[in-house]
Image (cartoon, coloured by chain):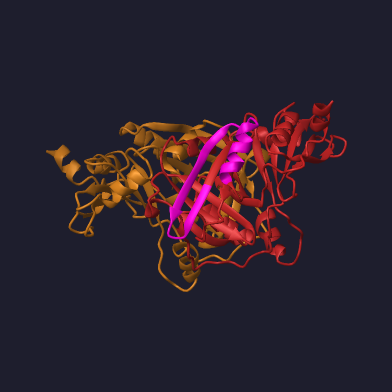
Chain colours: A orange, B red
Amino acid sequence: MNTAVVKESPVQAEDFLPLNGTDYVEFYVGNAKQAAHFYKTAFGFQSLAYAGPETGVKDRVSYVLVQNKLRFVLTTPLKTGSDIAKHIDMHGDGVKVLALWVDDARSAYAETIKRGAKSYMEPVVEKDEFGEVVRSGIYTYGDTVHIFVERKNYSGAFLPGFKTWNTVYNPEPTGLQYVDHCVGNVGWNEMNTWVEFYENVMGFRNLISFDDSDISTEYSALMSKVMSNGNGRVKFPINEPAEGKKKSQIEEYRISTAAPVYSTWLSLPITLSKPLRRLKTEVWSS
Amino acid sequence: MNTAVVKESPVQAEDFLPLNGTDYVEFYVGNAKQAAHFYKTAFGFQSLAYAGPETGVKDRVSYVLVQNKLRFVLTTPLKTGSDIAKHIDMHGDGVKVLALWVDDARSAYAETIKRGAKSYMEPVVEKDEFGEVVRSGIYTYGDTVHIFVERKNYSGAFLPGFKTWNTVYNPEPTGLQYVDHCVGNVGWNEMNTWVEFYENVMGFRNLISFDDSDISTEYSALMSKVMSNGNGRVKFPINEPAEGKKKSQIEEYRISTAAPVYSTWLSLPITLSKPLRRLKTEVWSS
């Protein structure tokens, strides 16, 4: 039957969710200024933009960093009991938003909602003197969300509401280029649910699969299915724990971060080239 | 009357709470490893000790830094809903413990409890292969506590339960010497309550007072009474907001940190000597 064929090979002739790449990754953290200092010093990120009380945002501060095609947003709550604070209590410093760069945020929202996505944010138009940005958002695993960012009519530093962040302290870049993939660590028996979500709701395909005989140590194991969008610019491996002598890596990570079900790892394309010796010295050995 | 004279001049002939100085300052923070990296890079602190799951502590990680007589402990919770997490939600990254170095932690506890202190921790003896430490603790303003540390029979890196923290990344010291004073910012009409606490419960004296004509700007003002122990090694200014055109500095700080009543500032003896140019560049201008 036609339906069965579609399910087995979910890559469609026309991509209903064309993605240009990762737009930004937003972390909810306990101390955004110190986190920014860390990513600047150890990873060579550069200061890009800022939002907070000085720009009219009352409940949070956000520092935005950039390095080549990577943009990180580091956000700290200013109010007790906020959703941001609850996320930090639950997950520690962690990823909240995996934002995806699109040409049409309204269409991205409509197409994914139509296919069963849970809405996080209906399309919103934000404007300032540099133009306008359209953003919309849907939930993925756990508390993590995807925000679709349409910025073709915008020339500002980051987004409306942010001002350029100029700093005196600007360590050299380390050579990081772009977000290669972002890993979602889900609970027992939940990998296929989220594989199907990325297939059916977002039009991704399963690029490659690893079972516990591929990824294991003496003590732990995991299974992984790598989901990719049509042009391969956005890849989300979905990991699930597997039985090992001891707890799996995923299970240990989930327990150690106190996250009941889901958590997100971010991977960058790291090779030990010369500028990255500093990274190795400052981060991995500290 | 004799009582009135004692109240007006609370310095007693014999110091019932002899203090050798500040032992350590413990901060509850969202990301202890990044905070440690920040204090190392920007302030020139050195790696000293570590406690966490690897040393048998299940619910937190603590990184200890040192520079001359300064010791900072940076602690992050590993469990959701813990007291540490609640402190961070309420105050943001902030000081929890102002630890005081004593020769007799049992006596320090007994003498302050006898004078009305609220107990935080009865005297506890902790031991390892480097000897033993006795610690006890009392509450001060808000959620902040004083822990009395008796370490005359101890030769380890920091405290029993901590292991030496050796790192490859060790920026140069900036020249910070010791904790000069720690400021407590209390609410309206509460300065004198805490001045009396330090006089009556801890045997401190009021070294100097500033009113709103001494400390004010066009928009804000504050009052401050500096409390000092007998030998002057421990100084705690107690600040209270005063009426100004706009909110006072204290009131603004209290609102911005979402702390309903109390918060703590830490001051270090900073002069702009040569090694501190790095500090100025890396922290104040970032």
Give percent across and percent down for residue B184.
69, 38
Give percent across and percent down for residue B207.
81, 42
Give percent across and percent down for residue A200.
27, 39
Asked if residue B213 is positioned above or below residue B274 in the image, the reply reads above
What residue appears at the point 75 percent right and 26 percent down from the top-left corner?
Answer: B189
Question: Magenta stretch containing residue B133, yes or no?
Answer: yes
B22 relative position to B56: left or right = right
Question: Magenta stretch containing residue B120, yes or no?
Answer: yes
For the N terminus of chain A, the quadrant is top left
A147 relative position to A190: left or right = right
Closer to us: A179 or B60? B60
Give the residues in magenta: B105-134
Residue B65 falls in which quadrant of the image?
bottom right
Give percent across and percent down for residue A105.
45, 39
Asked if residue A211 is positioned above or below residue A278 in the image, the reply reads above
Residue A220 falls in which quadrant of the image?
bottom left
Asked if residue A85 is positioned above or below residue A218 in the image, the reply reads above
Quick check: can you spot residue A97? no
Which residue of the protein is positioned furthest toward the right in this rendering? Answer: B213
A252 relative position to B37: left or right = left
Closer to us: A107 or A142? A142
Which residue of the protein is positioned furthest toward the left in this rendering? Answer: A1
Closer to us: A155 or A265? A265
Quick check: can you spot residue A19? yes
Closer to us: A41 or B150? B150
In this figure, what is the number of numbered marks?
0
What residue appears at the point 58 percent right and 39 percent down from the top-left corner?
Answer: B109
Asked if residue B218 is positioned above or below residue B150 in the image, the reply reads above
What residue appears at the point 40 percent right and 68 percent down from the top-left corner?
Answer: A271
